[in-house]
Image (cartoon, rainbow, N blue to C red):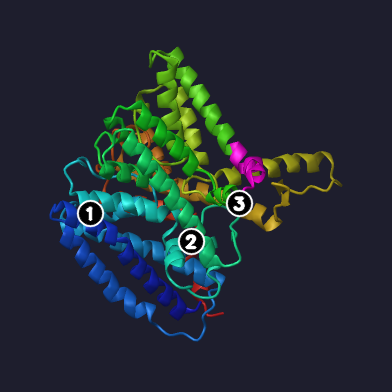
Amino acid sequence: MNLKIVLRSLGMLLVCEAIALIPSTLVALGYGDGDFLSFVYTIGLLLLIGCPLALLKTRQMTIFTKDGFAIVAIGWLLISFFGALPFYFSGAIPSFIDCFFESSSGFTTTGSTILTQIEGLPRGILFWRSFTHWVGGMGILVFAIAILPSLGVGSLQILRAESPGPIVGKLVPKIGQTAKILYSIYLGITLLEVILLCLAGMSVYDAFIHALGTVGTGGFSNMNASVGHYNSAPIDWIITIFMILSGINFSLYYLILKGNFKSFFKDQELRLYLTVMGTGILFITIDLLVRGYYNSAGEALRFSAFQAASVMTTTGYATADYDTWSMFSKVILLSLMVMGGCAGSTGGGIKVSRFLIGFKTTRYTFKRILHPNACTIVRINDKTVENETVLSVLGYFFIYIIVFIIAVIIISLNGFDFGTTATSVLATLNNIGPGIGIVGPTGNFSTFTDLSKIVFSLLMIIGRIEIYPILLLLIPELWSKK
C-alpha cells in the first residue's frame, strides 16, 4: 500500500469536510443560536490537520485497489469522528460517544438517534445533522472527487470501494466528470423537493431539513414526531415520491437526461425494485383496511406507502407508529428493510441488484442440475454478469450474516427483548434508522450502553461502505508493500 498517497487523499477528504461545514456555519450565524463557534473550531481543526496531509508529495500518484479500500475505510471513520465535533463543542450532545453515534448515523444516512428531544436544539446543529445525510448519501469521497482536482490516477478504485452495489462503473470516461454529473442530478432532485415542500406549507428551513434527509435517504427530522408532526397528506405524498426516487440508481437518471427513456424503463433492477415496493404497499394497505386501523382506503394507502417507501429506501421517516400494526404488516416492512434500495442509490440495505443476481443464479443452478451440459450464464439487462461478481455477491451474503449474528450476540448483553435486539442491529447495519420495540419509530437508541453505541456506530459505517473495506483493515496483507 502506498501510505503517502493514502495520507494525501485523507488530507483532501478532511479539507472537503471543512468545506461541507460551511452551509451549517452560515445557518448558525444567521439564526444566532450560539452554535456558530462550534463550527468554526471544527473547520479550523480540520484544516490544521488536513492541509499538511493534502500537500504531501509522492512520486507514485496511482491509486491501486488496496489504496482505494484503505482510503474509504479510514476516511469514513475520520469524517464520522470529526463530524461529531460540532455536536460536542456546542454542548448539544454532552457525551462524545453519543456525538460519534449521531455523526455516524448522519453520514451513513442511517437516521438512528440517541436524542430524546430534538426541537430545542440549535438550528445550525440540526441543519448539520441533516446535511451529513446529503453529503454521505452520494458518498463523501465522491463529493471530494467532484469538487477537488483528481485525487490521483485510479480514482475509480475509490468510487468502486465506496459506491453501493456489486457493479460500479463510470458514466463518462473521466471519473471526476462522472462524480460531477451524479452530484448535479442529486442537487437538482433535492432543490425540486425543497420547492414542492415549501408549496405544500413547510417553511424554507424545514423544507431543506426534510429534503436533505429524503434525497439522502437518512431520515433526520427537526421535529420530535418526524414527518408525522405536520399531519399533511400533500407533504406525506411529496416525501413518499422522493423517497422512492432516491432509492433508484442515480446513473439511470443520466439516461433520462440523454433521452434514453427505453433503457431506463427496461432496467431489470428498477423493475424488481418497483414491483417489490408496490406489492408491499398493496398488501399492507389491504391489511390495514381489513383490520380497521384506518377508515378509508386513501388514508390506509397514504400511511402504508409512506412507511413502505421509508423502510425499503432505508430513509427512516415516520408518519405512524408501525410498531402497533399487525405482525403481518411488520413482517412485510422487515422484509423490505433487508432488501433495501437499488445499487447506485443513496438507499441502504443489501441492495436489489444483489437479490436479482441471487435469484438468477439460483434459477440457473436448478437449470444446471436438470441439464448438466447446458450453457448457463447470468445476465442482467442483456449484459453478462461475470463469475467474479456472482461469487462476490454470494460472499457478501455470507459475511453479512456472520456480522449480523456477532453483532446481535454483543447487543444482547443489554438484556432487551429479541425484537429490539435483532432489529436494532438490522436498523444500523442496513442503514435504516428505526427498528421495532425500544428502537421503533417513536423510540431511540439512548438507553443502550456505550459499548453498544460504539458497535452500532461501526455497524452503520460497515453497512454504508458494504462491509468489505472495514474488514479489510484487519487483514495484514492490506498493509503489505507487496
Looking at the image, is mark 1 or mark 3 earlier in the sequence?
1
**Which quarter of the picture shows residue 292?**
top left
The residue positioned 24% from the left and 61% from the top of the image is 85
Other residues around mark 1 within 10 Å, as few (<14) / some (14–19) / many (≥20): many
Taking the magenta stretch, the answer to whether it contains residue 123 is no
Image: magenta residue range: 259-272
Q: Disc 1 marks which amino acid?
A: Val
* Rendering coords of residue 308 (x, y %): 45, 32
**Residue assigned mark 2:** 180
Residues 261 and 305: in front is 261
* Rendering coords of residue 332 (x, y %): 49, 29
Looking at the image, is mark 3 or mark 2 earlier in the sequence?
2
Q: Is residue 241 left or right of residue 96?
A: right
**Residue assigned mark 1:** 27
Question: CB of mark 1 within 8 Å of CB of mark 2?
Answer: no
Viewer-side label of 3, 2: 3
